[in-house]
Image: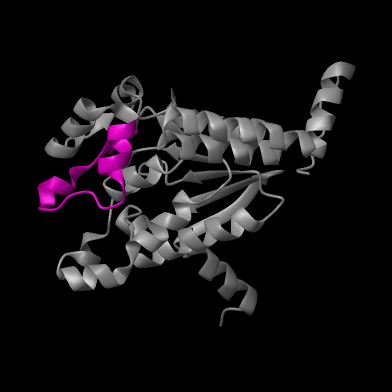
Amino acid sequence: MATSRETNAMAEATAPVLLDWPLDGVARLRLNRPQARNALNTALREALARALTELDRDTDTRCVILCGAPSYFAAGADLKEIAALGSAEVFKLDVPRYWKAIADFSKPLIAAVSGPALGGGCELAQHADIILAARCAKFGQPEVAVGIMPGGGATQRLVRALGKYRAMKLLLTGEPVNAEEALAMGLVTEVVEDDALEARALELAAHIASRPPLALRLIKEVALAGADAPLATGLMLERRAFELLFDTADQKEGMQAFVERRPPAFVGR
């Protein structure tokens, strides 16, 4: 008979999303549905939304890495769960609620993509602030091949990120692109060797986590809000946030450390 500790360990190992803290200030979320190549079902979506909501409130977490398995990031929506549903039943799944929890995450989010990131998996990566891709990564929106279209934001985010003509090719053909093609079109931040992906993600996350948390959050907030606003509005938001940071302890510490030629010690106040 399994002990309570063994039972808890088994439950954690089979959870749809695994959480650990590999470095100070850095949380790592790993998609964990190997039997379905990390296809996004309701349980995984709920677990991911819940984890990000909790990490957003955790003052010790400054940056989050989102990753999958070495051979696949996420294969898309779980078609076995939704194929037979009607429109009212799909509506009742309330999937936009889970996407919103990811989109509203206020801290830096790094997607480390290895292998296929297709459909909802590609849309999940697009919710990140930085996308690192292993050379074996593939990105695509193949929904049109099964009679539907993207439903997690790709028709909007890809056009904004890539421009109309590159985005429309991905959306209308359903054909994937490899990591180098994704880099060339602006879909990913950086391409690294397959076996260096997680190390590079940790290196980058640690560097970001060493920065002042309030400044990080305001940078993300202003950049995302300003992207959908007129330039004058975006510039106004930037200026107000810039001025606000002069009331923080981290601003005083950062500038004093610069004058004294020493590393700053940011505390998030």
Residue at the image position 33 percent from the left and 62 percent from the top: 95
Q: As drawn, is 165 to the left or to the right of 121?
A: left
| Magenta span contains residue 80 | no
Total residue callouts: 0
Q: As drawn, is 79 to the left or to the right of 205?
A: left
Q: Is residue 120 above or below residue 16?
A: above
Residue at the image position 32 percent from the left and 19 percent from the top: 184
Residue stretch rendered in magenta on the structure: 137-160
Q: Which residue is more in the foreground, 63 or 105? A: 105
Q: Which quarter shows the N terminus?
A: bottom right
How far across and how far down the image is residue 190, in percent?
44, 24
Residue at the image position 31 percent from the left and 47 percent from the top: 153
How far across and how far down the image is residue 129, in percent?
48, 37
Name the colour scheme: one colour
Q: As drawn, is 157 to the left or to the right of 13?
A: left
Q: Which residue is more in the foreground, 132 or 213? A: 213
Instruction: Check the image and name the residue furthest to the bottom.
Output: 1
Asked which quadrant contains residue 117, the reply is: top left
